[in-house]
Amino acid sequence: MTITPAGQKWLAVAEDLAEQLRIDAAERDRANASPVRELELLRESGLLTLGLVEADSWSTQMAVTRIIGAADANVGHLLGYHYLQLWRSELFDNADAMGRLRASTAENQWFWAGVSNPLDAALELTPVESGFVLNGRKTFATGAAVADRIVVSATRTDTGEKLTFVLDARAEGITYRDDWDNIGQRLTASGGVVFDHVAVAAHEVLGTQTEDNPRLSLAALGFQLVLAQLYVAIAEGALAEAAEYTRQRTRPWFTSGVESATEDPHILVSYGEMVASVEAAGLLADKAATALKVAADHGAGLTAEQRAATAVTISSAKVVSTKAANETTTRIFEQTGARATTSAYGFDRFWRNARTLTLHDPVVYKAREVGEYFLTGKRPPFTGYS
Amino acid sequence: MTITPAGQKWLAVAEDLAEQLRIDAAERDRANASPVRELELLRESGLLTLGLVEADSWSTQMAVTRIIGAADANVGHLLGYHYLQLWRSELFDNADAMGRLRASTAENQWFWAGVSNPLDAALELTPVESGFVLNGRKTFATGAAVADRIVVSATRTDTGEKLTFVLDARAEGITYRDDWDNIGQRLTASGGVVFDHVAVAAHEVLGTQTEDNPRLSLAALGFQLVLAQLYVAIAEGALAEAAEYTRQRTRPWFTSGVESATEDPHILVSYGEMVASVEAAGLLADKAATALKVAADHGAGLTAEQRAATAVTISSAKVVSTKAANETTTRIFEQTGARATTSAYGFDRFWRNARTLTLHDPVVYKAREVGEYFLTGKRPPFTGYS
Amino acid sequence: MTITPAGQKWLAVAEDLAEQLRIDAAERDRANASPVRELELLRESGLLTLGLVEADSWSTQMAVTRIIGAADANVGHLLGYHYLQLWRSELFDNADAMGRLRASTAENQWFWAGVSNPLDAALELTPVESGFVLNGRKTFATGAAVADRIVVSATRTDTGEKLTFVLDARAEGITYRDDWDNIGQRLTASGGVVFDHVAVAAHEVLGTQTEDNPRLSLAALGFQLVLAQLYVAIAEGALAEAAEYTRQRTRPWFTSGVESATEDPHILVSYGEMVASVEAAGLLADKAATALKVAADHGAGLTAEQRAATAVTISSAKVVSTKAANETTTRIFEQTGARATTSAYGFDRFWRNARTLTLHDPVVYKAREVGEYFLTGKRPPFTGYS
Amino acid sequence: MTITPAGQKWLAVAEDLAEQLRIDAAERDRANASPVRELELLRESGLLTLGLVEADSWSTQMAVTRIIGAADANVGHLLGYHYLQLWRSELFDNADAMGRLRASTAENQWFWAGVSNPLDAALELTPVESGFVLNGRKTFATGAAVADRIVVSATRTDTGEKLTFVLDARAEGITYRDDWDNIGQRLTASGGVVFDHVAVAAHEVLGTQTEDNPRLSLAALGFQLVLAQLYVAIAEGALAEAAEYTRQRTRPWFTSGVESATEDPHILVSYGEMVASVEAAGLLADKAATALKVAADHGAGLTAEQRAATAVTISSAKVVSTKAANETTTRIFEQTGARATTSAYGFDRFWRNARTLTLHDPVVYKAREVGEYFLTGKRPPFTGYS
């Protein structure tokens, strides 16, 4: 992926924030609080506005997500999804609504999240004079509880159409259940949301989701891609922190015959193998990002076959990055040694984050998609996950 | 390994206790308290006295360690090391001292632990009229803080001899630093110990450790073996709990075409691969246990070559079980699905326990021993880890 | 597995033959001829008669199969299947027929093979006055072309019953198609057989195969077990030959800093990892062998559940040994170095033999059986492969 | 890597030749002859002249090497090394000599090879009036026996300088030992070469190799890169041929419950995993290719640090592609099934080629380089392999 000079500046901003996040990442993971302070940091950095004005910011957004995600996978997750919600809202080609939303987001440094677990029952949208009334509940809405705006999809009770709209996350009738307490990605506020007679104005509707529209179907692929990027980020973060520990603290094994852990042949080989496989995973994630950009740029002309090839590249990236993340976050400990299991370092958070996030949807079905397309040319179906 | 009928009864006792431990294992892991209640349960079960009276209890002790370790790796660790301390104390052939100690242990349900991190500086033993005075500090003394008796080794300041003796864990001058706060094996009380002018009576001395005595050198191998057994236990426990979850809660993936997660072909294959590899690892750990028993039974006649072959078998077991434990505890989640990452289930404890315990000493150096012996016949040196 | 003193003598015989086979194993693999000379060697060694007189020879047969199979997987295959054909013929409890056959086999040093590919259409058995007439064709009948006696199953055209019988392999009407030319197991004479009006006398019939008889169904498991033993044997043979090469010929890498390849840390670790995993696989294969013996010893009283547990243990062994064989036979080259790819050494035969033999039936379905039994208790169906 | 429109035409040429090579690749591998006919095909295609006239042909050369290498790893190897010899000859910045050589190569469709095994003793170059006389012997000179021009390096007996020059491969005094008979890459004519008083004219000398020149040291990296590209190519070729077989011939397993092997869930997943990992490996090889191009384009200004970063990226690519090649070429058989081991298909050639070529130099030392650079920043030394 090529980053523009303007993008390079954003990367530097991201590196600065990453540096700050790394300092107390372990501590914040243990505290297991709502990511309020983390969002403040994102706002202060300006990163929430990246892409609102500039063209060609997709590569930069992806790179920034990786940098932040390596330092703190929670914050990377929130930020990557924020970019995604804005990006996928554009797919409806509702220039009017998006113009307003982009401007307000830039002005107010709004943080966006989504409410859309495809495995839950659909939310219900009842038409009323002023627009609609929204009812229902959804689980696992990453970031929604701390968001300013949420992107929501729901089914019209009269026509059965599925509309997507953007709400003020603090609107009356919305309750956040605060029921996310998981072993990883603890600071992502990924709990459930209840909508109880929430008013939805007509102008808040971005458009109608149709099941067979290749372009709109890219939204699901976007989430898969950001997940792949985050898996790579977690592996990169784990490697960086482990290496720092090995350099600073690991003692050479007493029968190794070397003076320093950084000379131990097995430690060197193991780092080399991890670095190489994570690098390969990262390149595939980047290729997938480029592919999705190209697909989206096709606009309404995107064909089902182009969409399929894009989906399969993203699935490949997910397969490879899932493996890299889970393996790397376990293996780093062999290079740090036993004392690095001290809770204060919190190095298990990389594995816990990787393990939790890589279960988003079963990766074996991604591999199956890739294999089926390769073997038979069969295209992945349009679903919330493919 | 063959278990005697008397042993079978102990296995039943162990299964009962395991059942009880499983109920709140996750909760106790989170509480991260000293394993006081766990020791009470061990005492109530009578398992601490297994082997004090019966002959041929080695296989039973190993099997019991696996059963308890699968339910709660912390308690399995404490119990396995308890058996080990008693066993390795016998290697000094001090029938007099051991007769008394065995009797008192049986009578009082004493729990034994050891203080012996080989990587620390040696403790110092200054001769005085009544025996010795002990000074120094050691790290990572699993179980010592909650033990009744501790096995300690120290170097005489006058002769340089290394003596091993058994102390009342509550004796004056002994302080437990309570500094074990790690990501796994949280309830093993594996903190440091300080000895400040602790009196050691002559009759408490079991014997002198000489560096070149094959029989005494078996002690180090015993710990390696128990670790291998615990790695297998953790993998077995992870598989059992994951399977129960899959049966009870996992939902079939929506594109799987099956009605139940227990019919998903990928879930079935994955369990099959894990079960098979853990079974193989368990057999190798059992072979290693038998080998160590045979070696110890050789008594003073144990040759250096017999000792080497035993050490290498144990190292092989450690290599295979390390891999099985780390892989299984990561992989189970793919069969349980995303919701199993809920903190309440605490399924990450299997990985955290495996990851922590498998770092006891670097397994790559075990593989190196095995390879060197296979390739060149070179025997592993006598160290605290081989 | 415990080997009797009588068995120990057979192991020595096997070691002698193995030594002889190893000398020109690569050359014979290249020549790709019918294993006539190999069978002569088996006859001369007396190994074909092992088990015809002695009780308790099962463990010895398995151990001998491993020893010979490590030296030459082709000959191990022929011998293991020979033992298996005799063993599985006993399952019909036709003492009369088997008494005669055992005696003649011992007297004439007969070599047995079987004709039974379950994936082919059944052979047809038409009743005639003197017994039956046999017609049909089968593929992949290992050893049949060089056998003295072949065990054949066919379906009666009148009753539909499936009979099993033992024929003179040279009987009129039997043609061997000599169509086995594969990348591995080249000297196993595993071609097709055509039966054209072959006379089958009534007294040659061992019994009737019924689909739901647990005891008779053990035959299929026997083949699975012998395959697992051969996979382990191939891995063991590969390791032994590679180690010999490393010791004799491998040069240390010029940046390794060591004087000899046998001191290279990476070579040592790699051998250690392979030795350990092959050892574990071997123990599981031995456990499976013992389980099958126990199951067969139950006689008619064998329950479906006992049969299922046996089948699953054998499948576990196959899963683990398949992996060990394929991985080891690829990995050894990293320890021998580039020059060991010289054709004269023929070290690729280990991989070619392993790769060919481990495809006998798809191992993923074995893993699936193991997983399903573990997860749901569902017993493997009675088939030609399970 | 971006391919120019001119390059796209070359890719089409390469695809045509690949199609032709695939037809009898197995047969030619079995015949194990000198690659004379293969070179004719290369000449007829015009591919030997790719890059002699056009600028920016590096990416195209790499892509062409992959396409041809996937169809026939032998021919890919010859072609890739041909490009490499021309490329690395340019590093001496001897515009005069190279101008002539490029022109003649284009005119005569010369095929280039090299004679340079760094592990052998150096060739000796004795100054005489007309230039030099060359003596000595080298092993493993891929393609030299069928080449038109060979690039040779030798040490001056007077000054100790190491000169590199280009000889007519048929010059008097050069003998090709025809001693390459290995399990893989059989058609690469990789035998030894003897130089017996071979005349070397002064104008044939490209320049002097100095040990500490970053730019000239790129030659060694070029070979490493081409090897990585070939490993990827072999994996790609194996996947393509296996998939074709699965589609055309593989029968579904009888307990699979599906009608066609292309619906078997395990086959689909396995292809998916292989495709994804090979794709990632290919991207890393391409990144390495770009990095080497950038490094070479720095010209004399190339810094030691830039050179190190390039070397490490190439080593990473080698680590990842080695794994992908060895794993894929073994694993494909699980998707084709047992009958695909028939010798006529020759599917084992992928593994034999991969296994042979990935032993070029021990990959574990490449991983070590990558790890050391990551951990400590230490730069790989300038050697014939790094």
Image: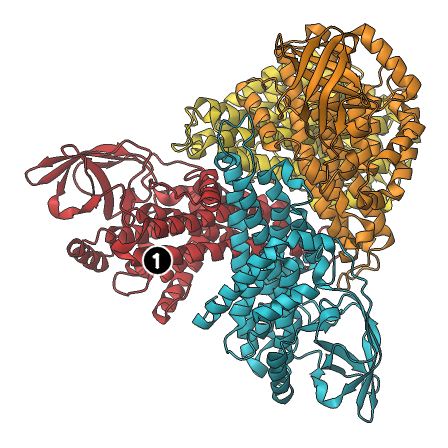
Chain colours: A red, B yellow, C orange, D cyan
**Depth order, front residue of D205/A65:** D205
Image point (58%, 44%), residue name: A341
Is residue A282 at all visible to an observer of this figure?
yes
Question: Which quarter of the rendering shows the C terminus of chain A?
Answer: top left
Please tell me how many numbered marks the rendered image carries: 1
Q: Local crowd at mark 1 within 10 Å, few (<14), some, or many (≥20)?
A: some
The part of the image, by quadrant, that contains residue A54 is bottom left
Give percent across and percent down for residue B112: 70, 26
**Up/down of C230 relative to A49, above or below:** above
* Parent chain of label 1: A
The part of the image, by quadrant, that contains residue A289 is bottom left
Give percent across and percent down for residue A71: 45, 54
**Depth order, front residue of A81/D286:** D286
Question: Which quarter of the rendering shows the N terminus of chain A?
Answer: bottom left
**Up/down of C368 relative to D378, above or below:** above
The residue beneath circle 1 is A293
**Up/down of C159 relative to C263, above or below:** above
Image point (46%, 43%), residue name: A376
**Is residue A202 toward the left or the right of residue D188 in the image?**
left
Identity, as a three-letter code, of the amino acid under mark 1: Lys
The part of the image, by quadrant, that contains residue C121 is top right
**Is residue A348 toward the left or the right of residue B12 in the image?**
left
Image point (41%, 43%), residue name: A378
Give percent across and percent down for residue C147: 82, 26
Q: Residue furthest bottom?
A: D129
**Is residue D181 toward the left or the right of residue D50 in the image?**
right
**Is residue C283 toward the left or the right of residue A312 in the image?**
right
**Up/down of C34 relative to B121, above or below:** above
Give percent across and percent down for residue D345: 65, 46
Is residue A72 at all visible to an observer of this figure?
no
Q: Describe the element under mark 1 as helix, strand or loop.
A: helix
